[in-house]
Image (cartoon, helix red, strand yellow):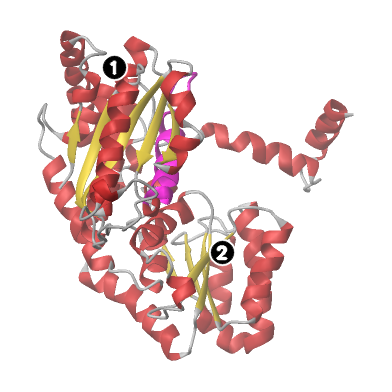
Amino acid sequence: MIRVETKGCESFVDSAKYEAYVAKALDAFDVLKDETGAGNDFLGWKKLPRQITDRELSEYEAIRDKWARKGVDLVIAIGIGGSYLGAKCVMEALSHNFAKQLKRKDAAEVVFAGNNLSEEYLAELMDLAAERNVACIVISKSGTTTEPAVAFRIVKQFIEERYGKTDATQRIVAITDAKKGALKTLSNQEGYKTFVVPDNVGGRFSVLTPVGLLPIAAAGMDINALVEGARKAESSLAVKSAENPAVVYAAMRNLLFSEYGKTTEILVNYNPKLTYVAEWWKQLYGESEGKDGTGIFPASVNNTADLHSMGQFIQEGTRILFETVLHVEKARRSMVIGPDPQNLDQLNFLAGKHVEHCNHMAELGTRLAHIDGGVPQMTVSIETLDAQHLGALLYFFEFACGISAYTLGVNPFNQPGVEAYKKNMFALLEKPGYEEATRAIRARIQ
């Protein structure tokens, strides 16, 4: 279901060096498969697709259906990082671009909170909530992460005041730790329905846990097809081979980085529905590989739009870049360009052609131009952008990330650097227990 092509890199790399990095990637494959590497207690995501049961999926759909019977038309999903990006990317990829404007109401609208501390955002979210019938999914292992905890405090109060404490328990679902933490304690006290954040699955790998699947189901997406695609990818990628797409991708990106100074990877799409897939990918690879003073910097562009903004730099700027193009082979809709009697735009030569054909030619032309400009190119292809192929794509990137990070020589499953900003923030907010840190940081900024 996933194809990786590296022809656009061949003029930049030595074939013998590539074979050496394939060997390294195959060694990393063994480390990942045998679970002998650093962070191996966070490999639960690896077997998730085949372990997800029909009963689990039906539980998520049952909540969607229960809320539909209550007339819920707005679900506020609260979480940060991997606790929202996976669900967000699936919803954006599978939704009609103009569903809101068309006022389609096949399922509740799912919006996100707890991923920022913008007062305006939260105030405007509550403006929306005041006009709608609201339920909430709150996602936090501890229940004390600042951004989602602030958002949940506000949303919880709103739901309780509008619907009453009893009905609020039917409108709030918590995805949290199995046994401990502030959110688990509150859920037990209030009687919320809860699902578990698995201990052996990190946030950025959690899209196929309740963290991602419940919000996706609430939005009316086909979670069965999503999981089925991931199952097919899990099966195919488990085969150790130099042609394994995950091995090919990991080997080439590490070769370009380590031997040729290509320190930035740009994930390129030619379909705006893939914008948040790139955002999810950036967290997955940035947080997994960016440590110990190393790592490939993940960036993204949305073409053809960004060719009119970032295209100049990519074509002729600092030669630190390589691109990975997300290629969708077949569009799911049909739109043919018609003739125009005046032909003032001089586009009659396109009459009778599908718009997607033009899009593919723009993609191919751009790839060739960027290769000529010194930017190596890979493509990751799926047949079409539907739930099954998207599930396969997400699992592919997760599996390839584990291989790539082990090839790079880092632990893919920790993130020690993300705690630094929290300590400073707590000190500046004068959180109890941070008095000494508060004094020290205030002295620095005076």
Q: Is residue 53 above or below residue 242?
A: below
Instruction: Give amino acid for label 2.
Output: Leu
Q: Main secondary structure of the magenta part?
A: helix
Report the residue at 63% width, 59% height from top.
Answer: 149
**Residue 288 horizontal side relative to residue 181, left or right:** left
Name the quadrant of the C terminus. Answer: top right
Start-end of magenta stretch:
274-295
Q: Which mark is residue 255?
A: 1
**Residue 433 horizontal side relative to residue 399, left or right:** right
Q: Quadrant of residue 190?
A: bottom right
Residue under label 2, please give it. 183
Q: Quadrant of residue 87?
A: bottom left
Q: Position of residue 163 (x, y in %)?
A: 62, 88
- Element type where label 1 sits in the image: helix
Question: Label 2 neighbourhood size at 10 Å, few (<14), some (14-19), many (20+)?
Answer: many
Q: Is residue 284 magenta?
A: yes
Q: Position of residue 288 (x, y in %)?
A: 41, 34
Q: Relative to the observer, which residue lies in front, 378 or 141?
A: 378
Q: Relative to the observer, which residue lies in front, 264 or 98?
A: 98
- Can residue 406 be seen here? The reply is no
Instruction: Give amino acid for label 1.
Output: Leu
Report the residue at 19% width, 35% height from top.
Answer: 4
Q: Position of residue 133 (x, y in %)?
A: 56, 84
Q: Position of residue 54 (x, y in %)?
A: 21, 71
Marks 1/2: CA–CA distance = 44 Å
Q: Is residue 246 magenta?
A: no
